Image (cartoon, rainbow, N blue to C red):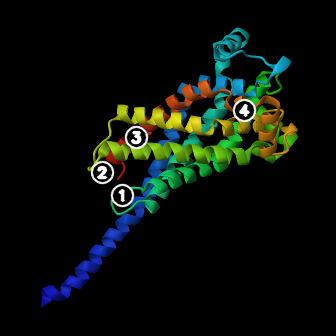
């Protein structure tokens, strides 16, 4: 009888203990994602920045007598001749300052959304993978990517001038805010949200799908880091082919001559009318080389850091 009377008490206690443990677990996963993502972003951008520099230069290049470069090799050659090897790292500080919060928001948001949308087997349906990725992309676009990308593009664009006006990061940001207001840091917000949202929806969607495919019937099966790298490179390839036109429009909207466009859609129209469809795929090859390497490194680093955190951070 005593045992029977104690059963409801023991059950309630068990439920309280488990629910109390479950709540921090979800928050802890998001916090781990934020910290691991920030570390990942800082390391990754230092490795891949020169390809981002070349991609941006080619996207800013226009037709006719204003055309400056005849392709990737010519861009690298002229940059090195004019400014030395470190010229390829112009604007790196901007991305280092921005990549850490960008990756932190991206992975933190994804992990948090994943805890809400995964099923009882801790798996995401195909549509929920896309939604988690979309949420991660929109979050990073608003809180980190737009101001970071605007400053980066203006810095690189500034280098194309005969007498560059920005003397450094703080001077450049101060000048932009003085001349254009705080809104000057949010040029191309619509294009950036569209780009980052579709970017991360495709990347996380492809990555999670490939990882589930590799695991087969065993959801707890570990995916080797080199395999994660291959999956990441393919996810990067898919995202580049899917949204480079949005990336070109975003770059134009954030350049020093953005004032000639009324808005994102006017920019699309003018690029199409003046330069044709091919202009929407300018910089695809350098972007492809950067993004495939970027996404492969990012996911490998992130998974490695998370594995370490799971061992020491309970």
217 is higher (above) or lower (below) than 160: below
User: Could you tell me which secondary element the residue under label 2 belongs to?
Assistant: loop
Q: Earlier in the sequence, mark 3 or mark 2?
A: 2
Residue 260, visible in the rendered structure: yes
Indicate left or right for 222 with 185 as reference: left
Circle 1 is placed at which residue position? 122
Q: Earlier in the sequence, mark 1 or mark 4?
A: 1
User: Could you tell me which secondary element the residue under label 1 belongs to?
Assistant: loop
Nearer to me, 113 or 202: 202
Residue 187: x, y in percent? 77, 43
Nearer to me, 10 or 267: 267
C-alpha gap between disc 3 and disc 2: 16 Å
- Mark 3 vs mark 2, foreground winner is 2
In the image, which disc is placed on residue 219? Answer: 2
- Mark 4 vs mark 3, foreground winner is 4
Name which residue lies at 36% across and 34% down. 227
How dense is the environment of label 2, judged by Cα within 10 Å: few (below 14), some, or many (20 and up)? some
Q: Earlier in the sequence, mark 3 or mark 1?
A: 1
- Mark 3 vs mark 1, foreground winner is 1
User: Could you tell me which secondary element the residue under label 4 belongs to?
Assistant: helix
251 is higher (above) or lower (below) than 21: above
In the image, which disc is placed on residue 303? Answer: 3
How dense is the environment of label 3, judged by Cα within 10 Å: few (below 14), some, or many (20 and up)? many
Circle 4 is placed at which residue position? 277
Indicate left or right for 305 with 86 as reference: left
Labelled pair 1, 2 in contact (Cβ < 8 Å): yes
Name which residue lies at 39% across and 36% down. 228
Residue extending furthest bottom?
A: 1
Residue 168, visible in the rendered structure: no
C-alpha gap between disc 4 and disc 3: 38 Å
């Amino acid at each position: 009888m005593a045992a029977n009377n104690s059963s409801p008490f023991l059950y309630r206690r068990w439920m309280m203990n488990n629910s109390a443990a479950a709540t921090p677990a979800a928050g802890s996963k998001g916090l781990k994602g934020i910290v691991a993502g920030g570390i990942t972003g800082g390391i990754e951008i230092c490795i891949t920045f020169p390809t981002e520099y070349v991609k941006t230069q080619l996207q800013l290049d226009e037709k006719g007598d204003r055309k400056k470069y005849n392709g990737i090799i010519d861009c690298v050659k002229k940059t090195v001749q004019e400014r030395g090897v470190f010229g390829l790292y112009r604007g790196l500080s901007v991305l280092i300052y921005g990549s850490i919060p960008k990756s932190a928001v991206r992975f933190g948001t994804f992990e948090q959304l994943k805890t809400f949308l995964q099923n009882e087997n801790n798996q995401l349906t195909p549509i929920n993978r896309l939604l988690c990725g979309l949420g991660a992309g929109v979050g990073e676009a608003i809180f980190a990517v737009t101001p970071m990308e605007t400053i980066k593009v203006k810095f690189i664009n500034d280098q194309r001038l005969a007498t560059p006006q920005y003397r450094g990061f703080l001077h450049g940001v101060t000048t932009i805010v003085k001349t254009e207001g705080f809104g000057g840091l949010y040029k191309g917000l619509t294009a950036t949200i569209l780009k980052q949202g579709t970017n991360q929806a495709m990347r996380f969607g492809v990555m999670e799908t490939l990882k589930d495919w590799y695991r087969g019937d065993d959801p707890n099966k570990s995916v080797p880091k080199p395999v994660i790298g291959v999956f990441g490179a393919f996810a990067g390839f898919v995202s580049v082919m899917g949204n480079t036109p949005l990336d070109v429009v975003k770059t134009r909207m954030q350049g020093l001559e953005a004032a000639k466009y009324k808005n994102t859609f006017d920019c699309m129209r003018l690029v199409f009318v003046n330069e044709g469809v091919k202009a929407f795929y300018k910089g695809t090859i350098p972007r492809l080389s950067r993004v495939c390497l970027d996404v492969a490194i990012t996911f490998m680093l992130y998974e490695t850091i998370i594995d370490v955190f799971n061992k020491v951070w309970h």
